[in-house]
Image (cartoon, grey):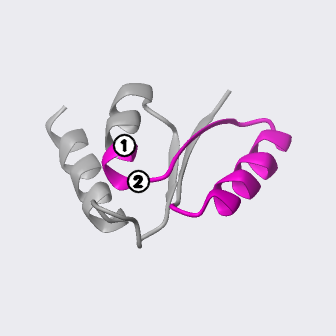
Amino acid sequence: MKKILVVDDEESIVRLCSAVLKAKGYEVLATFDGREAVDLARQAEPDLVIMDVNLPGLDGLGAAFLLRSKSRHA
């Protein structure tokens, strides 16, 4: 089963995306901030990350940069 990480600071968006993706047969992981998204993605190794750009603390662009730089050095 393909795994998707959904990251958004708005709970309603995370719930909606998660429900739609689960109904389509995906395993869904979710979090609400960029730092936690990086940690969760490194741990769970999702097939896809859907992430908002405007997140509290570490924003989506910063999180994506950290994930991308880690995958290059793996």
**Residue 48 in the image: x percent, y percent?**
52, 46
The disc at residue 70 is none
Name the residue type under label 2. Asp
As helix, strand or loop, the secondary structure at mark 2 comes to: loop
Q: Residue at x 33, y 33 (%)?
A: 42
The disc at residue 36 is 1
Q: Is residue 73 left or right of residue 43?
A: left
**Residue 12 in the image: x percent, y percent?**
70, 61
Q: Residue at x 49, y 36 (%)?
A: 46
- What is the quadrant of the C terminus in the image? top left
Q: Residue at x 30, y 48 (%)?
A: 35
**Residue 6 in the image: x percent, y percent?**
56, 50
**Location of mark 2 (residue):** 33
* Quadrant position of residue 3: top right
Q: Is residue 6 above or below residue 39?
A: below
**Residue 23 in the image: x percent, y percent?**
85, 42
Name the residue type under label 1. Glu
Part of the protein shown in magenta: 9-37
- What is the quadrant of the N terminus in the image? top right
Q: Is residue 70 left or right of residue 45?
A: left
**Residue lying furthest right:** 23
Q: Is residue 25 left or right of residue 27?
A: right
Asked whether the beta carbons under mark 2 and mark 1 sit within 8 Å of each other, the answer is yes
Q: Residue at x 78, y 40 (%)?
A: 22
Marks 2 and 1 sit apart, C-alpha to C-alpha, by: 6 Å
Taking the magenta stretch, the answer to whether it contains residue 10 is yes
Q: Is residue 41 above or below residue 20?
A: above
